[in-house]
Amino acid sequence: MTRDEQIAALTRARAEVGRVIAGCDSPQIETIARSADMELHWALWNLGEPVSLRAEMDEPAAPGR
């Protein structure tokens, strides 16, 4: 897997985790998902990618937010 493929896969995984966080109704699961998001953040950061600290910061704001 090339560096670019790794970055793309990690970015997709982070987007999915962000969706879990946004739609979660369990504080325990949300906390675990946030931990996974942070690990993905660090993986991308270590590959030299400019990433926001929290996945939901990368998502466009929903109307009314």
Image: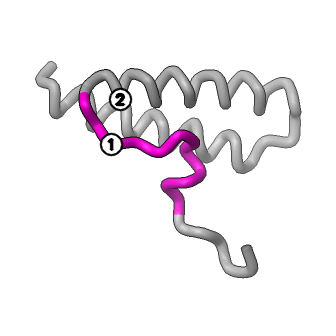
**Where does residue 49 sit, x and y in percent of width and height?**
28, 37
Residue located at (67% from left, 30% from top): 34
Magenta-drawn stretch contains 56: yes
- Looking at the rendering, the stretch of residues picked out in magenta corresponds to 48-59
Label 1, residues with CA under 10 Å away: few <14, some 14-19, many ≥20: few
Residue extending farthest bottom: 64
Name the main secondary structure of what is drawn in magenta: loop
Asked whether 52 falls inside the magenta stretch, the response is yes
What residue sits 72% from the left and 22% below the top? 32
Q: Which quarter of the figure is the N terminus placed in?
A: top left
Which residue is disc 1 drawn over? 50
Left or right placement of residue 24 versus residue 5 in this view: right
Q: Residue furthest left?
A: 2
SS of the residue under disc 2: helix
Residue at numbered disc 2: 45
Question: Is 34 displayed left or right of 8 in the figure?
Answer: right
59 lies above or below 37: below
| Vertical side of 1 occupied by 23: above or below | below
Q: Residue 62 placed where, x, y %? A: 65, 72
Q: Quadrant of residue 10?
A: top left
In this view, 19 is above or below 60: above
- Give coordinates of residue 56: x percent, y percent: 59, 51
Q: Position of residue 48 (x, y in %)?
A: 25, 31
The amino acid beneath tag 2 is Trp
Look at label 1 and name its amino acid.
Pro
